[in-house]
Amino acid sequence: MNKLRIHPNKIAGKINREIYGHFSEHLGRCIYGGIYVGEDSTIENVNGMRTDVINALKKINVPVLRWPGGCFADEYYWMDGIGPKEKRKKMINTHWGGVVEDNSFGTHEYFELCRQLGCSAYVNGNLGSGTVREMSEWVEYITFKGLSPMAQLREANGSEEAWDVKFWGVGNENWGCGGNMNPEYYANEYRRYQTYIRDYRNDGGIKKICCGPNADDYTWTRTVLDTCFRSSAPEHHGFMDGLSLHYYTVPGDGKEKGSAVFFNEKDWYRTLSKTLYMEELIERHGQIMDEYDPDKKIGLIIDEWGTWYDCEPGTNPGFLYQQNTMRDALVAGINLNLFNKHCDRVKMANLAQMVNVLQAVLLTEGERMIKTPTYHVFQMYKCHQGASLVESTLETSRIGLEEAFMVPNLTHSVSVDDIGQVHITITNLSADEASEIEAEIMEREVKEVKGELLAGDIHAKNTFEEPTNVQPVPIHNIILDNGAFKFTLPPCSVAHLVVK
Ligand code: AHR
């Protein structure tokens, strides 16, 4: 029996909605085919956006969408993606499969996508190969409401209204694909570029995200904070509002990343153990950030996370298309619990990527679309968006097959929403053992508990032939007992319980 104690009156922080954010890059079939099919497509669409995809995404309340990359961002010239489509320049997407990018999805289409999803915009600017002027003019084009060259160009291209952009990334992975810079060089470039991200609305402006470390590169974090964080500028916490962190869960070592669907129990625990490393990264980068920013005004922005396997056999290796199983559901549930628990510092996270790329929530094939196990986790966890994290403890035991890759049998997080309901999300990491849980809500009488469960064999997945193989079902075995309650989680499962 694992005991769960919840203190609904001890608020530990606010879970920013943006922790449930997504990422869509011009990569493979994420944008083209996955989201955008063009107005003339035979696939049902509104202004070129797939209706099935938009409807599915609306159900998980996408709060924010990062675009256009990724590595693509530092090669992207936004002016190539505006104006009449037939006149837009074509380019080679050198990072991702060497295919022709026809720029038919550009700034106007991105903001139409955000409008249809009802989400905030997070644009990633080009610092690696673009100029300060280009980035500055893009901000002007998007946000300026008065008379200016870029506002007039926007109007001429059909949008009289300016758009809101909440977050702006100043380069992507500039330690790698974004220019192979060292931290000192990037930090100075960052200071210069961010100067020209103007606050045209005079409303506190766009939140600026500085390129942060690759996984455990703590030197990068310290160096960019040394140069770019200034505690004395009250309006902008120095030069930045957020520092990004990228960390992918890769089960294999070296060249082989491992298959998305063919794996054994050792691979299962390796994957979950590697995903749990995220907590150490959050804590150690967080400690460095605390030295500069003890009031936690700047956010750790985990704007790329998720599983990365060898791509599906027979698909373009540059397209990063992979299947998604219950293992991915566990990876999602574990990470989202971690982000909730560290919501004092983690202000945004963006799963990589939204459709057809890496740990996607949706997969498409022609006009068909399926929801992955990861999608269902986002649906079950959306209750946490904007809620208050509350204190809780859960007894766990260590499980696994190899000493180096042991994991706790359970992870969890608990929040209280604005009508006082308690939401518990919990993952059972065991490949073959159920866990019994006895939960107690302190200083509250439990009247009603409902739950939904996502469970299956570790390899369980949805396919175009069997699209509903994995989907949430109600939990029927919740037993109310003297103010507390008990339930059993099957092996390899993710659950959401709501206590009224
Ligand atoms: O998400 C795929 C790629 O992973 C992104 O383009 C890049 O930022 C990261 O290396």
Image (cartoon, rainbow, N blue to C red):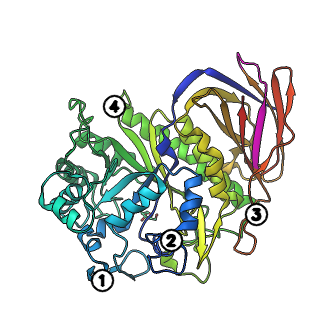
Name the residue that disc number 2 marks. Answer: 45
Q: Is the CB–ligand 1 distance for label 1 below 8 Å? A: no
Q: Amino acid at mark 3?
A: Ala
Q: Is residue 250 visible?
A: no
Quadrant showing the C terminus: top right
Magenta-drawn segment? 442-453
Instruction: Judge the density around disc 1: few (<14), some (14-19), many (≥20) Cα neighbours within 10 Å.
Output: few
Q: Farthest residue in the left direction? A: 148
Q: CA distance from mark 1 to mark 3?
A: 44 Å
Whether pointer 4 and pointer 3 mark residues with C-beta atoms closer than 8 Å, the reply is no
Residue 450 pos. (x, y %): 77, 37
Whether pointer 1 and pointer 3 mark residues with C-beta atoms closer than 8 Å, the reply is no
Q: Earlier in the sequence, mark 4 or mark 3?
A: 4
Residue 66 pos. (x, y %): 41, 56
Name the residue that disc number 3 marks. Answer: 460
Q: Quadrant of residue 265?
A: bottom right
Q: Earlier in the sequence, mark 1 or mark 2?
A: 2
Q: CA distance from mark 2 to mark 4?
A: 46 Å
Left or right of 25? Residue 199 is left
Name the residue that disc number 1 marks. Answer: 86
